[in-house]
Image (tube, helix red, strand yellow):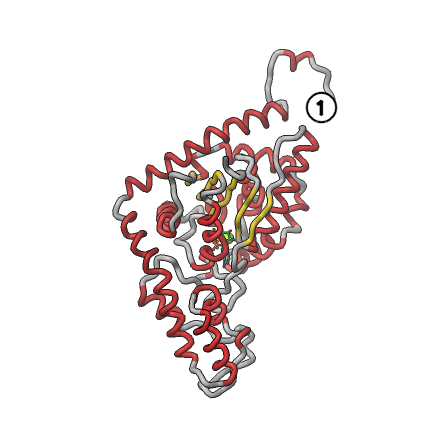
Amino acid sequence: MAAGRILTGMRPTGPLHLGHYVGALENWLRLQREYECFFLIADYQAFGDHLDEIDRIRRSVFDVTLDWLAVGLDPEASAFVVQGYVPEHAELTLYFSMLTPKSWLDRNPTLKAEIAQIESEHDTISMGFYNYPLSQAADILLPKADLVPVGEDQEPHIELTREIARRFNRAYGETFPEPKSLMGRVPRLLGLDGQAKMSKSLDNAIYLSDDAKTVQRKVRRMVTDITGTHPRMQATDPGVVEYNPVFNYHDAFNPNADEVADLKERYERGTVSDGEVKDKLVDALNTFLDPIRERRAQYEAHPDQVAQILEAGSERERKIARETIGEVREKMRLTYTPDALTAPVGKRK
Ligand code: ATP
Ligand code: MG
């Protein structure tokens, strides 16, 4: 018997990066044998800010799937679902958008930060983008998931999902569980540029599919001081470990704890160059990524198989989705039987 049900996912906005691994995928890998898992590729959600880039979204649906397979997620054990293949996701989003006060979205800190970022680049966001936390709540509640393993930026959305579940249950009777979130080992991996989050959209990421040379080039260009106030000009300058994201990555990906401790100590004393600290990180990252690259290449050679995995996984979720939507429609009384003609008119119940 499974310990419960998981729904979690990714947006098909590009290939996956190291932040996805430590923030989410590592937990998915651990939990895929214990829980009944639905891993969602949220294409509707990607339309919210990439509608004019359908080719990129289509390519990214494949990239995300390849990355999942490459890290070792098992499509036999878990369902890989394409959101748009199960339109019940859209239907539940619609009902939730009627049920949810706008103020609940206005105060969501992750949404606020993302809107500010988009508005600094383009003029405006779409209604679909504004609504995406609700679509995410619908994604999670459609299969009645108990647990949602995600990175830290998603926590406000999971809280919103619990609020919506409570509101629906109060209005229409007990229907949805209140899912818990589960943070990864590194809840938020910094960007190569020192920004607070490595992100596909910010172009500050090392991708799981980057080759060894690209990893080297990116690490060599990494900022070494997120404050910008402790410039270290030469190897003999004492450095501050906590300001240097290179050490952040060593902590996350270098399994040789003695080497990391030694580098940190020498860095603080001013007896190691930034170049050496970075070269050791390049080695650690490439050792970590090598088997992932290899498995990815194997699946990439078989696109038919990948497409089939998405079909089959979506089909598995669709059965459950239909049941939930049937229950929701009944509870919301969206059933127009003849007795509706003669029933007394009141509010809600
Ligand atoms: P986009 O910029 O298009 O939104 P993203 O990089 O934020 O892309 P998502 O698909 O939105 O990726 O997020 C997928 C999952 O990965 C979420 O659980 C999110 O919390 C997690 N995640 C993304 N970036 C990081 C990061 N830098 N550190 C830890 N977890 C992360
Ligand atoms: Mg995101």
Does residue 105 appear left or right of residue 221 in this picture?
Answer: right
Write the residue at 47% across / 40% down. 37
| Count of numbered circles on the image | 1
Q: Quadrant of the C terminus?
A: top right
Which x, y percent locates residue 234? 45, 86
Residue occupying the point 53% across, 39% down = 3
Please state which of residues 225 and 109 is positioned toward the viewer in this rendering.
225
In the image shown, does 75 or 122 lie closer to the viewer? 75
User: Is 66 located above or below residue 187 in the figure?
Assistant: above
139 and 103: which is toward the camera = 139
- Identify the residue at image location x=48%, y=74%: 261
**20 is higher (above) or lower (below) than 192:** above
Type of amino acid under label 1: Lys
Residue 26 visible here:
yes
From this viewpoint, which residue is outermost toward the left? Answer: 301
Kindly identify the residue that appears in the image at 57 percent across and 47 percent down: 130
Q: Secondary structure at mark 1?
A: loop
- Residue 137 image point, x, y percent: 57, 41
Q: Residues within 10 Å of mark 1 (few under 14, many from 20)?
A: few
The residue that label 1 is drawn on is 349
Residue 249 appears left or right of 109: left
Residue 157: x, y in percent?
Answer: 59, 48
Q: Is residue 6 left or right of residue 290?
A: right
Residue 54 in view (yes/no): no
- Camera-nearest residue between 13 and 247: 247
In the image, residue 267 above or below residue 79: below
Asked if the beta carbon under badge 1 is closer than 8 A to the nearest atom of ligand 1, the reply is: no
Q: Quadrant of residue 328?
A: top right
